[in-house]
Image: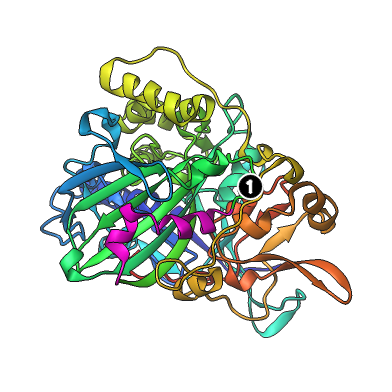
């Protein structure tokens, strides 16, 4: 097919912290040198920030390097952390507050800020455009261009294709965006990043990547209960009842609002676990309910988190480009933070790309990036925390927590722990697993999935191909249902997957319109039978203030 093509020096996929930091740093370096450098960034959301979901408490280290005057420029870091609390929930009613000295140092939040990461990205997008970055929101990167084993750009998704695959009257073919170098910054489990890692064998010799599913809500609360700057973290009930691991967060941000969420490790083994329902019942615990009662839930969303750390970090370069940020897996799970490390990886990528362009290079592999990143503070952080996740998986919550306390608070424990079982391979048969009877939502603290999806402002254009592809349509009913009671019904936090039974019998139904683009199905399906691909541009959630 003949497609319109545009040429740039650098093409960037993804308008999150790493992609925007790459773009901004490139233009800053070009301006310092008095050079022209064309930089294009495509973002599948309807606007920059529309698909961004994170807790979020962030460090300003990378932002201060990128914009030393970020306060004067109005960056939306308005809520410094004032109080840091950690709880262990022993049961549905009981809890223990951890003394400050028992908490691993990386989890301390002195000097950090509670933010809406979506709003931070909106602000970064404004800064990027102000210095000449061309940003195209609403355009998905459907595939990358490979010629003679070299990545030379991307092709945006076609618009106006019907569910049956036919061109409608609104058909518009995607464009080729070609660059001297292409940077992939799609966030966790990016669909092109996943392909690049496989095609170029970037993860050879590495532990498999590990993930969590983060589910988050935004609440307006009673002003009398508001404690701006309070950060609460915790673990234990209800996940402990199914021997699952993870943890919750609750942050008092500005404007009498609270964000609350649960991260469930996707290494759980009981196929009856529903991360969404675990979160809903968790909010009834007194530690959380005291903040939320009498409030109003105003937004909902979910997103997978790459938490394998250094042991799972793939090679980040290949001929023609780089993969950065959470697309590669730069999150520091010991801090439950990835924004600052994602930004730094993008900034280092920009610096090495600029050196290559200055040298007249094009479409080769910028192998110098590896040493440059390994000499950065981001890599130092990841190396120091490399055993945090494996310790929790290997030794459990108590012994793993003790290991991490000793390693981070007393003395470094030598050696490297490995976790070599991928998350999709951890499920036990349903017949060997305890069934979980989740309580019905009360409509005050806990809610149904579809009501939640509604306030996530989720929308996809009607009559388009399903973006959740089954390699083998028979597997859900013939294999996953008898073996695991088809866990897609429960691990999806948006009600996308259903087993429907009627006069014709049972069928596996995909409600792709509900999809919040969390990528959990692509990760946790035990048969690795579901592949998430980009829907038509601008589809998905539209998160305000998340």
Q: Label 1: few (<14), some or many (≥20) within 10 Å?
A: many
In the image, residue 158 above or below residue 381: below
* Residue 275 lies in the magenta-colored region: yes
Residue 327 shows in the view: no
User: Where, quadrant-wise, is the C terminus in this rendering?
Assistant: bottom left
Residue sitting at 21 percent across and 44 percent down? 84
User: Which residue ends up furthest to the front in the rendered image?
Assistant: 93
Q: Position of residue 528 (x, y in %)?
A: 71, 46
Farthest top residue?
414
Quick check: 154 above or below 168? Answer: above
Q: Quadrant of the N terminus?
A: bottom right
- Answer whether residue 162 is magenta in the image: no
Number of numbered tags placed on the structure image: 1
Q: Is residue 104 above or below residue 116?
A: above
Nearer the observer, 147 or 529: 529
Residue 410: % across, % down: 27, 17
Position of 112 with respect to 188 (left or right) is: left
Q: Nearer the viewer, residue 158 or 518?
A: 518
Q: Main secondary structure of the magenta part?
A: helix
The secondary structure type at the circle numbered 1 is: helix
Where is mark 1, residue-wise?
524
Q: Position of residue 184 (x, y in %)?
A: 49, 49
Write down the region rendered in magenta: 274-294
| Nearer to me, 208 or 478 | 478
> In the orientation shown, which residue stands out farthest toward the left?
72
């Amino acid at each position: 097919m003949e497609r319109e093509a545009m040429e740039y020096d650098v093409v960037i996929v993804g308008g999150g912290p790493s992609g925007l930091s790459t773009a901004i740093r490139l233009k800053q370096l070009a301006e310092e040198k008095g050079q022209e450098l064309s930089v294009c960034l495509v973002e599948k959301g309807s606007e920059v920030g529309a698909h961004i979901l994170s807790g979020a408490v962030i460090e300003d280290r990378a932002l201060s390097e990128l914009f030393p005057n970020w306060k004067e420029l109005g960056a939306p870091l308005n809520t410094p952390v004032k109080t840091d609390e950690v709880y262990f929930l022993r049961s549905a009613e009981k809890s223990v507050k951890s003394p400050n000295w028992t908490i691993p140092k990386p989890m301390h939040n002195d000097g950090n800020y509670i933010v809406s990461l979506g709003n931070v990205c909106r602000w970064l997008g404004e800064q990027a455009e102000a210095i000449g970055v061309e940003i195209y929101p609403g355009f998905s990167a459907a595939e990358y261009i490979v010629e003679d084993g070299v990545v030379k750009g991307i092709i945006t998704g076609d618009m106006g294709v019907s569910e049956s695959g036919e061109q409608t009257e609104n058909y518009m073919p995607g464009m080729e965006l070609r660059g001297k170098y292409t940077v992939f910054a799609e966030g966790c489990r990016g669909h092109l990043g996943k392909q690049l890692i496989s095609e170029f064998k970037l993860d050879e010799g590495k532990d498999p990547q590990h993930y969590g599913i983060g589910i988050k809500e935004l609440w307006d609360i009673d002003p009398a209960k508001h404690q701006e700057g309070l950060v609460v973290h915790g673990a234990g009930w209800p996940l402990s009842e199914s021997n699952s691991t993870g943890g919750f967060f609750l942050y008092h941000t500005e404007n009498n609002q609270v964000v609350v969420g649960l991260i469930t490790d996707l290494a759980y083994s009981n196929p009856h676990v529903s991360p969404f329902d675990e979160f809903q019942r968790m909010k009834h615990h007194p530690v959380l309910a005291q903040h939320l009662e009498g409030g109003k839930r105003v937004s909902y969303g979910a997103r997978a988190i790459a938490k394998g750390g250094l042991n799972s970090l793939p090679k980040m370069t290949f001929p023609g480009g780089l993969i950065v940020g959470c697309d590669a897996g730069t999150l520091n799970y010991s801090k439950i933070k990835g924004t600052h490390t994602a930004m730094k990886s993008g900034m280092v990528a920009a610096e090495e790309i600029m050196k290559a362009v200055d040298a007249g290079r094009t479409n080769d592999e910028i192998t110098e990036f590896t040493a440059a990143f390994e000499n950065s503070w981001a890599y130092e952080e990841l190396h120091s925390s490399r055993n945090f996740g494996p310790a929790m998986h290997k030794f459990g919550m108590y012994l793993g927590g003790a290991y991490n306390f000793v390693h981070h608070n007393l003395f470094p424990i030598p050696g490297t722990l490995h976790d070599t079982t991928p998350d999709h391979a951890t499920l036990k048969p349903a017949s060997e697993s305890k069934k979980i009877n989740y309580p019905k939502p009360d409509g005050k603290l806990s809610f149904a999935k579809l009501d939640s999806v509604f306030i996530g402002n989720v929308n996809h254009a009607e009559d388009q191909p399903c973006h959740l592809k089954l390699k083998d349509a028979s597997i859900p009913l013939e294999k996953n249902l008898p073996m695991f009671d088809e866990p897609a019904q429960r691990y999806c936090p948006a009600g996308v997957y259903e087993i429907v039974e009627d006069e014709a019998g049972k069928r596996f139904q995909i409600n792709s319109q509900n999809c919040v683009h969390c990528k959990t199905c692509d990760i946790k399906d035990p048969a690795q039978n579901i592949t998430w691909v980009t829907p038509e541009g601008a589809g998905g959630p539209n998160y305000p203030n998340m």
